[in-house]
Amino acid sequence: MAQPILTTAVASLAVLLLATQIPWNASTLNALRAAHADRPLQSPVAVFVGGTAGIGAALAVKTAKYSVNPDIHIVGRKKASAEKVLAELRTVNTNGTYSFHECDISLLSNARTLATTLAHQLPKINLLVLTAGNLSFRGRTETCEGHDVKMVLHYYSRMLFVDAL
Ligand SMILES: NC(=O)c1ccc[n+]([C@@H]2O[C@H](COP(=O)([O-])OP(=O)(O)OC[C@H]3O[C@@H](n4cnc5c(N)ncnc54)[C@H](OP(=O)(O)O)[C@@H]3O)[C@@H](O)[C@H]2O)c1
């Protein structure tokens, strides 16, 4: 568990250093977009835990849009939300493969089962995006496994997916 934390800390520091060095503005963004426009991702396999809404769903759609033959997996609890995202993915890129994995990852046993399934099922994973979470000002809310929901969604399950995948 120490290695992912160290990796995350180093990566965060690198991003911070880069962000302070580069004068970010609209032309920088446009230059970046132009530089990547003719270099789509080739057959990426991408997993979005929290891909049925919000940031995860938006990133999944952009990944599909800028890829050739993407294989995209979205994870969440709500089938209806997932169907909408899957429909959008199919619209932005007709040549992709798109799957929904219904899973309540507030239980670590569920998250572990899903991670194990994905690890066996997928030949590789190029992108792992972990955005499942909820904004709550409530105090500790225990799952039947005895963990606080916020801690599971925002930390324990994320480390579990990083470790397993
Ligand atoms: N948006 C912001 O401005 C902002 C700012 C600061 C921090 N954040 C944090 O960034 C993360 C993503 O934000 P967002 O705006 O994308 O949130 P969002 O629109 O509410 O989406 C949350 C995603 O997490 C999934 N999710 C929530 N609980 C889950 C569970 N128990 N099991 C499986 N999936 C679950 C949801 O899927 P289902 O509903 O289908 O389960 C959904 O796909 C959150 O942790 C949020 O607290 C967001």
Image: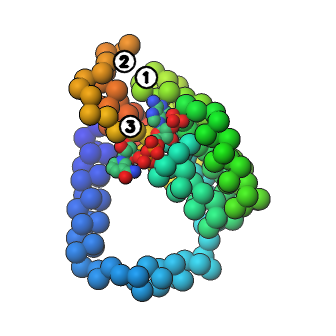
What is the total number of numbered labels drawn onto the structure image? 3
Say whether disc 1 or disc 3 marks the residue closer to the N-terminus: 1
At mark 3, the secondary structure is loop
**Residue at point 60%, 57% (across, down):** 61
Horizontally, residue 20 falls left or right of residue 150, namely left
Do the numbered discs 2 and 1 sit on residues whose CB atoms are within 8 Å? yes
Residue holding disc 3: 134
Q: Nearer the viewer, residue 30 or 46?
A: 30
Q: Which residue is under mark 1?
A: 107
Q: Amino acid at mark 2?
A: Thr
Q: Nearer the viewer, mark 2 or mark 1?
A: 2
> What's the mark number on residue 141?
none
Q: Is residue 106 above or below residue 22?
A: above
Of marks 3 and 2, the one in the foreground: 3
What is the quadrant of the N terminus in the image?
top left
Q: Write down which quadrant ligand 1 falls in.
A: top left
Q: Earlier in the sequence, mark 3 or mark 2?
A: 3
Q: Which residue is mark 2?
A: 143
Q: Earlier in the sequence, mark 2 or mark 1?
A: 1
